[in-house]
Structure formats: structure tokens, C-alpha cells
Amino acid sequence: MNDWLYHVTGFLSLGGPVVWILVLLSHVVVAIAFLKLWQFGRMGLFQQRSSRRTEAALANYSQGGATDALTCLQDVRDPCAELLRHALRHLQRRKLDAQQLQDELTRFAQDQLNQLRAYLRPLEVIANLSPLLGLFGTVIGMIEAFQAMQQAGSQVDPAVLSGGIWVALLTTAVGLAVAMPAVLLHSWLERLTEHTAARMQDSIARLFTLDAERPQDSVVPASRPAVAVVKPHATPA
């Protein structure tokens, strides 16, 4: 194990400081990956149970009212369920008019989505920057290789030149190796965030449709609040 680690370290050292910067960025990508997987898992985004409970809550609201719907959403931490629970509590109290309710739900929805977007921007930056750093290291290595060839004059050794070129290309390979997983991870997490935003928008629209269709004993907001959900890439982490 120690011999393998020694050989890998020596191999990477050939690429110079650019390779070590890329290795550091790869550790950042791994850290962000574990953090986001833990966060998304804790919020229930990988569970079909959360979607089923949301659907059941909407059905319960249509048949029994806000109390039955809130009971169905107990212990569900999905952002869509959190927003639905927040809206149901305000519908129970009936203290906000349509505009105030819209503003409050928009604020709450954006707060939930901002938590999902956290650290997506650094991941995107690393995915875009890594190939450029690798190319930069390759250009520097090629310059050094051709300088050595120039200094050698007519006594240039092709083996020395080819050795300098493959060492220079090492940084590009490392840069691409860091960038590809980062791009895949960022695209997947962004897609999950977009899907969650769409579910939140759909759930609130259905809730207020059901609210408008139910007979009310108290005053109902004059119009259906519309939650404005910002695109996942619009707000930097």
C-alpha cells in the first residue's frame, strides 16, 4: 500500500504545482458530493415516500380539511411537504390576504430552494476551471520542453523531448479527470433541485385549486397565490 502511494505521489509530482492544485480541487469535489448527498437524503429527496405523503395530504385536504392534511404530513422533511405544511397552516388561520400569502409562500419556497442550491456554484466553478488549469499546465510544460530543446541545439535528444511532452500532457489528463465527475455531479444535483422546485409549484397550485372548490365558513383569499420559484442556477451559493 505504501509503495503504491509512493509511486502515485511521484507520478503526480511530475506535473508540478498545477497537478497538486487539481488534486486539491478533487478533494473539494468529493467533500461537496458527500455533503450534498447527506443533505438531500436527510431532506427525503431520494424517497418515493415523500411524494406519496404529499399526494395523500392533498387528497385529505380535499375531503377533510387542513387538519387532516397536516396530520398526513407529520415527520416529512421533503421541501415540497414543508412548503405545503406552511401553506396549510396559513389557510387554517386565514389572517393573510392573497398578496400577503403569495409573498410569504414565495419567501418560504426560495429559502427551501436556496438550501438545495448551496455549494452548487463552487462545484460548477471547479467543473469549468479544472480543464483550463490542466491546459495551462500543459502549455507551461510544452514551453519548458521546447526551451530545453533550444538549449541543446544540434545535440537534442528525441527521448528528452518526448519525455517532456508526456509530462506536460499529464496536467491536461488530471484536469479532465477532475472535471468529468464534477460536471456529472453538478448536473445531477441541479436536476434534482429543478425537479423539487417543479413539485413545489405544482403542489401549491393544486392546494389552492382544492381550496377554491371547497365550501368555506370563513373568508377566502380573493385569488390564488402563485409561488414564484427562481431557477436553481439563478442564486449563487
Image (cartoon, rainbow, N blue to C red):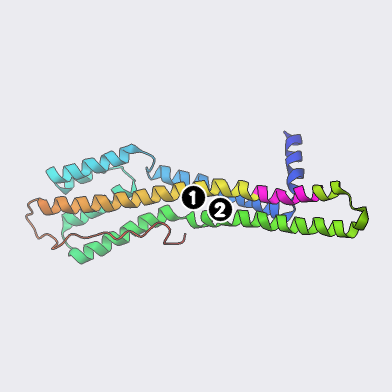
Question: Above or below — where is 232 with respect to 8?
Answer: below
Inspect the image, locate mark 2, and give the three-letter code of the amino acid beneath it: Ala
Residue pointed to by mark 1: 186
- Label 2 environment density (alpha carbons within 10 Å; few <14, some 14–19, many ≥20): many
Is residue 36 found inside the magenta-colored segment of the image? no
Question: Above or below — where is 44 with respect to 122?
Answer: above
Which residue appears farthest toward the right when viewing the image?
155
Inspect the image, locate mark 1, and give the three-letter code of the amino acid beneath it: His
Q: Position of residue 173 (x, y in %)?
A: 66, 47
| Residue positioned 34% across, 52% down in the render | 197
Residue pointed to by mark 2: 127
Which numbered disc flags the more N-terminal residue, 2 or 1? 2
- Is residue 156 rendered to the left or right of residue 7? right
Q: Position of residue 79 (x, y in %)?
A: 33, 49
Between the C-alphas of marks 2 and 1, the distance is 8 Å
- Is residue 67 rendered to the left or right of residue 8? left
Q: Position of residue 6 (x, y in %)?
A: 76, 40
| Residue positioned 36% across, 38% down in the render | 47
Q: Are marks 2 and 1 in contact (CB under 8 Å)?
A: yes
Magenta segment: 163-174
